[in-house]
Image (cartoon, rainbow, N blue to C red):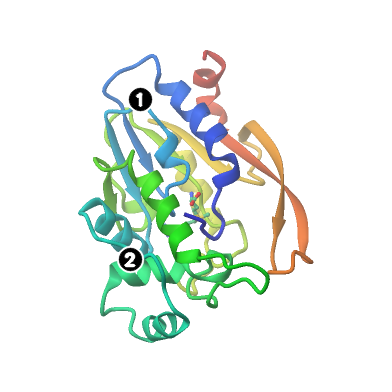
Amino acid sequence: MRYQGGKSRIAKQIASVITNVCSRESNLTFVSLFCGTCSIESKVTGFSRKILNDKHEYLIALLNGVKNGYELPEFVSLEEYQYLRTHQNEDKVLSGFVGFGCSFGAKWFGGYARSKTTNRNYASEAKRSLLKDMATLMDAEFTCKDYREVELPDGCVVYADPPYDGTTGYGNEKFDSDAFWNYMREISKNHIVFISEQNAPDDFVSIWERQLTRTLDVNKNNQFKATEKLFVHKCNEKYIKNL
Ligand SMILES: C[S@@+](CC[C@H](N)C(=O)[O-])C[C@H]1O[C@@H](n2cnc3c(N)ncnc32)[C@H](O)[C@@H]1O
């Protein structure tokens, strides 16, 4: 399912880098600290356990709901969208689905998505792509915590796709990138940690890069190019080179 800051266009490539790391070992756990709608997490294979975390409670309610068999709607009207926007706690699974899947740019209740020129059904598209991704995640454990509170089992492989530096993180809180990089340094001592970002401090090295065009508005007037990168801390570089 599309998601603000989501990486669906490069998900396969990032997932294959992470999957390669675990291909020589068995019984490894994969932990994603900022899973969003799991476009990458659903394509990572070969791990015996997956712990997928995000601090957005409606998003995690949605992922747990689908895992437990919740039937998502095929269509959501403008009236239903507006009602849910102001009654988000009545059904958190449905709010999670509608708030992202039926909103322009998949921005949390950022405006009812519709097209002036086509009959696109955003709810149906979102449902189909979420169910496709969730098909490989029915055994995953979804948690709703701050990323620093997520359990990291011995020897697990960690993936972090944080809000971009300088952007709003969870709710209206600005994401503290210095604290984030310090935590990445700390956990890289005991785990292989992959980080999706455009820039990183000097002690992190980029092991994969891809240029993407990003669009900010519905008419595609506001487009810019960005280079997506995958970083590891330099103390983890030896594991990557040995692949
Ligand atoms: C860039 S998005 C992740 C996109 C996702 N990997 C995808 O491809 O769909 C960043 C995520 O970080 C979550 N987030 C923000 N602050 C957080 C925190 N302190 N702890 C855990 N998750 C947080 C947001 O809810 C958001 O889902």
Work out whether mark 1 precedes mark 2 in sequence or the reverse, and give the earlier one: 1
> Which residue is rendered at x = 38% and y = 86% of the image?
83
Tag 2 residue? 57
Give coordinates of residue 130: x percent, y percent: 40, 52
Against 95, is 234 above or below? above
Residue 19: image x %, image y %? Answer: 44, 26
Residue at 50%, 48% in the rendered image: 161
Q: Is residue 210 above or below residue 34?
A: above
**Tag 1, which secondary structure?**
loop
Taking the image as drawn, is residue 37 in sight? yes
* Residue 198 rendering spot, x and y as whole percentages: 66, 46
Q: Are marks 1 and 2 in contact (CB under 8 Å)?
A: no
Q: Secondary structure at mark 2?
A: helix
| Towards the viewer: 239 or 95 | 95
Rate crowding at label 2 as few (under 14), some (14 to 19) or many (20 or more) other CA atoms within 10 Å: some
- Disc 1 crowd rating (10 Å Cα; few below 14, some 14-19, many 20+) is some
Which residue is label 1 attached to? 46
